[in-house]
């Protein structure tokens, strides 16, 4: 069948409207002869509906065919089919998959907490009993949520997770007999910096800077890793509370770059101190007293160049003091007493020139006192009582003119007392008890008459007489010399001091009366 079609186009391809009319003969090769068409029962001019649809499609094809040459028509049909398939594969199907698995379907939106870890999201999504899940649901119920910046959403989430992880509903404040109601610890209406003033302090920008639990009782559980979301956190103190976690799981040190003070005395922390503590490059104060930490001190402590104070008393530490401690040029106080630290003091200790107090009571430190200790001219206290030190006391100790207390008792020190001891003009307490010191007491000790109040040299191998120059030491309160081979003092030398209150203990005199008979 041949039909005439008139087609009008009004676009010239250059953005101008023109009118173009074409008369074309369109040949429908598949159309039936008009004589073969019969009317259907419903009045349709087609024999049946399927044939009608097929003929419509054929008509469209023929219409396209009429505009395009044969080769372009075939390519167009292939491109059309390919484009349709590509759209399905690239856009429709992935979108359907993503939609079906999207967290939003269960009320979870990762955008709310942009820096939360995969571990946090795992707990939120798949563990409905976790503190993280409960904290997230609490956050979603916050009527002001839409107004918060990302850091504030994360801060509120972190604090609620902290609260729920550590038995928060049962916390009490020192001086209060009953637990607070839960709403008084955390609530939607108040800023998080106002929730718990006994524990939380914020900086001028509203970011949490301090978490201190000293006024709160009842902590029990594990500090959650979400603490790392508190990016401005500078001080943490969880002392005197029970943490149910190992030291290795305590905190992600590498995620707390702003931390300046970490205190957890008597927290029941177990395990070893992780080398990752070296990431806390801004840390100034570290105190982990009375925890069963065990193990050695990591060499990465030497990276904490801002550290000023380290205290790990009764921590079951063992092994050597790493030489890297010499890198701590800002360290002022080091207290590691009552542990099992061994080996010798590293000579690098002389590099710690800011050190004011060195306390290693009751350890197993052996070897000799390094002469470099004389470089620590800011020292006011040395406590090395009850160790295994041997050899002689280096003469360089005379350089320690600021030292007020020198405690070297119960070691294996030998040799002569250096005469340079008389240069330690600030010394008030001298303990050399229970060593193997020999020779006589140097007369230069009398130069310390201004400040020295206690001298304990009991149980050594000292010989000779008590220097008569010591009669000028009017501030001396106690002189313990038992367990030596010293001569009985001349009554005219120490007796005036004894009569003024000096307590003298010496084998050659069984009583004060024997040493200094009444006038």
Image: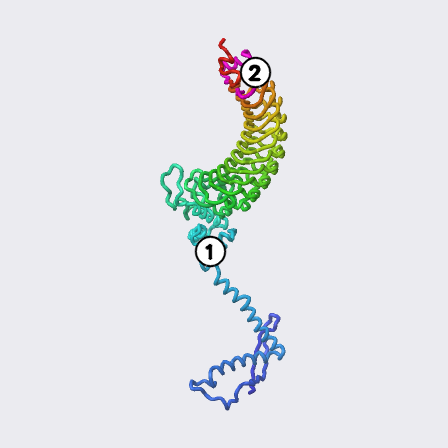
Q: Based on the picture, tell me whether residue 482 belongs to the magenta stretch.
A: yes
Percent from the top left, x then y, of residue 457? 55, 22
> What kind of element bears circle 2?
loop
Query: Residue 401: in sight, yes or no?
Result: yes
Q: Residue at x 53, y 46 (%)?
A: 252
1 and 2 marks in contact (CB < 8 Å): no
- In space, the residues marked 1 and 2 are separated at their CA atoms by 83 Å
Q: Position of residue 300 (x, y in %)?
A: 59, 41
Specify the label residue 125 is tagged with: 1
**Where is residue 69 drawn, in percent x and y?**
62, 79
Q: Residue at x 55, y 46 (%)?
A: 254
Q: Is residue 257 above or below residue 404?
A: below
Single out the residue that lies furthest toward the left.
178
Please tell me the numbered disc located at residue 487.
2
Residue 387 drawn at (x, y percent): 55, 31
- Which region of the structure is painted magenta? 479-503
């Amino acid at each position: 069948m041949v039909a005439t079609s008139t087609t009008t186009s009004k676009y010239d391809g250059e953005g101008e409207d023109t009118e173009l009319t074409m008369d074309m003969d369109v040949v429908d090769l598949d159309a039936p002869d008009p004589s073969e068409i019969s009317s259907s029962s419903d009045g349709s001019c087609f024999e049946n509906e399927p044939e009608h649809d097929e003929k419509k499609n054929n008509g469209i094809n023929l219409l396209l065919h009429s505009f395009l040459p044969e080769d372009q028509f075939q390519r167009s049909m292939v491109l059309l089919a390919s484009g349709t398939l590509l759209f399905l594969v690239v856009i429709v199907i992935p979108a359907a998959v993503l939609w079906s698995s999207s967290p939003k379907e269960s009320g979870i939106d990762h955008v709310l907490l942009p820096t939360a870890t995969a571990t946090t999201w795992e707990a939120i999504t798949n563990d409905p009993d976790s503190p993280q899940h409960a904290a997230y649901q609490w956050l979603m119920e916050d009527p002001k949520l839409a107004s918060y910046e990302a850091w504030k959403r994360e801060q509120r989430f972190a604090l609620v997770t902290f609260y729920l992880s550590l038995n928060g509903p049962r916390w009490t404040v020192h001086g209060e007999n009953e637990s607070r109601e839960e709403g008084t610890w955390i609530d939607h209406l108040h800023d998080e910096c106002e929730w718990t003033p006994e524990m939380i302090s914020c900086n001028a920008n509203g970011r949490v800077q301090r978490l201190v639990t000293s006024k709160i009782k009842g902590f029990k559980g594990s500090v959650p890793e979400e603490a790392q979301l508190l990016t401005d956190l500078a001080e943490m103190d969880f002392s005197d509370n029970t943490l149910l976690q190992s030291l290795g799981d305590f905190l992600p040190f590498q995620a707390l770059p702003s931390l300046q003070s970490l205190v957890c005395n008597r927290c029941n922390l177990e395990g070893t101190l992780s080398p990752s503590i070296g990431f806390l490059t801004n840390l100034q104060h570290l105190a982990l007293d009375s925890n069963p930490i065990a193990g050695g001190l990591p060499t990465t402590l030497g990276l904490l160049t801002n550290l000023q104070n380290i205290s790990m008393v009764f921590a079951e530490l063992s092994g050597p003091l790493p030489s890297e401690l010499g890198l701590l040029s800002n360290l002022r106080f080091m207290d590691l007493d009552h542990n099992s630290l061994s080996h010798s003091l590293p000579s690098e200790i002389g590099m710690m020139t800011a050190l004011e107090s060195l306390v290693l009571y009751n350890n197993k430190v052996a070897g000799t006192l390094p002469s470099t200790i004389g470089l620590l001219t800011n020292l006011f206290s040395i406590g090395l009582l009850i160790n295994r030190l041997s050899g002689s006391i280096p003469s360089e100790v005379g350089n320690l003119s600021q030292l007020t207390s020198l405690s070297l008792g119960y070691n294996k020190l030998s040799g002569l007392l250096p005469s340079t001891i008389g240069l330690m003009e600030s010394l008030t307490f001298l303990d050399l008890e229970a060593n193997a010191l020999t020779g006589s007491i140097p007369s230069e000790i009398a130069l310390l008459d201004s400040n020295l109040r206690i001298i304990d040299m009991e149980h050594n191998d000292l010989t000779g007489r008590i220097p008569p120059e010591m009669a000028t030491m009017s501030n001396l309160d106690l002189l313990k010399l038992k367990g030596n081979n010293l001569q009985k003092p001349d009554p005219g030398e120490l007796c005036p001091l004894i009569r003024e209150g000096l307590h003298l203990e010496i084998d050659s005199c069984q009583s004060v009366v024997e040493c200094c008979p009444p006038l």
